[in-house]
Image: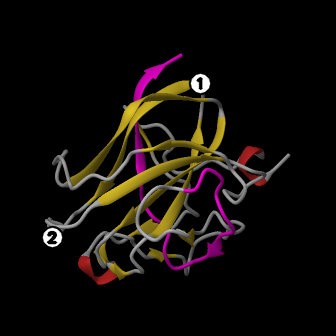
């Protein structure tokens, strides 16, 4: 039994219509201080616990400062491969989208071509951009319990640069400073 199935309870795994990522009990500072300059085409991944069989139809992430007004984004969803996305199968690729919607306060929405089914367990959500000022948030962990890597944050550099996601997630790099906060919108519960 892997870490993702061992009873670890994320702070918020299913809130209304949203599935949010694991994190280690710390909190996200969604202010501009923690915005990151990243490599174009770098895919930051979030582990999301799926509590029951359901379908999802959007990848959503916050833009709390409302400063992402240019650039293109692309989202992908991978299966878990023993508590890591590396080697996981690509389930969905949103295709290239500019920021398309404002939701709640401020958020960037990447719709899936059609809703996809997810089973109970862990799934990995990745987003990449063709711009450098891109919302990947730092996480404060000094007084928080530690969880194993890659649940603290990870990424891979897309072999083709910004564009289509690989059909199998390549090797990842652990990045404890940046756990991306991508969420999935639940379309239906089975």
Residue depicted at 19% across the width and 45% down the height:
103
Badges 2 and 1: C-beta atoms under 8 Å apart? no
Residue depicted at 31% across the width and 69% down the height:
30
Q: Residues within 10 Å of mark 1 (few under 14, many from 20)?
A: few
Where residue 190 sits in the image (x, y, percent)? 54, 16
131 on left or right of 23: left
- Looking at marks 2 and 1 on the same chain, the residue that comes earlier in the sequence is marked by 1
Where residue 143 sits in the image (x, y, percent)? 56, 77
Numbered label attached to residue 53: 1
Count of numbered badges drawn on the protein: 2
* Disc 2 element: loop
Distance of label 2 from label 1 (alpha carbons)? 35 Å
For residue 114, which quarter of the picture? top left
For residue 83, which quarter of the picture? bottom right
The one of 138 and 9 positioned closer to us in this rendering? 138
The answer to whether residue 176 is above or below residue 179 is below
For residue 56, which quarter of the picture? top left
> What is the span of residues highlighted in magenta in the rendered image?
166-190
Where residue 107 sits in the image (x, y, percent)? 23, 53
15 on left or right of 88: left
The answer to whether residue 13 is above or below residue 26 is above
The one of 113 and 3 positioned closer to us in this rendering? 113
* Disc 1 element: loop
Residue marked by disc 2: 67
Residue depicted at 48% across the width and 46% down the height:
12
Q: Residues within 10 Å of mark 2 (few under 14, many from 20)?
A: few
Q: Indicate yes or no whether the magenta region holds residue 55.
A: no
39 on left or right of 51: left
The answer to whether residue 157 is above or below residue 92 is below
Q: Main secondary structure of the magenta part?
A: loop
């Amino acid at each position: 039994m892997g870490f993702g199935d061992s009873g670890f309870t994320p702070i918020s795994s299913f809130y209304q219509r949203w599935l949010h990522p694991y994190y280690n009990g710390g909190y996200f500072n969604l202010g501009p201080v923690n915005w990151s300059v990243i490599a174009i085409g770098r895919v930051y991944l979030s582990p999301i616990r799926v509590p029951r069989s359901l379908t999802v139809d959007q990848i959503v992430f916050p833009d709390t400062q409302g400063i992402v007004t240019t650039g293109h984004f692309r989202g992908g969803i991978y299966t878990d491969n023993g508590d890591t996305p590396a080697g996981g199968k690509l389930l969905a690729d949103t295709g290239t989208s500019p920021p398309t919607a404002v939701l709640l306060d401020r958020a960037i929405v990447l719709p899936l071509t059609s809703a996809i089914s997810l089973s109970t367990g862990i799934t990995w959500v990745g987003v990449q951009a063709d711009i450098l000022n891109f919302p990947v948030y730092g996480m404060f962990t000094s007084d928080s319990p530690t969880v194993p890597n890659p649940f603290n944050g990870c990424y891979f550099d897309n072999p083709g640069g910004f564009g289509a996601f690989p059909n199998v997630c390549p090797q990842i790099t652990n990045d404890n400073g940046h756990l991306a906060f991508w969420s999935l919108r639940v379309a239906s519960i089975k």
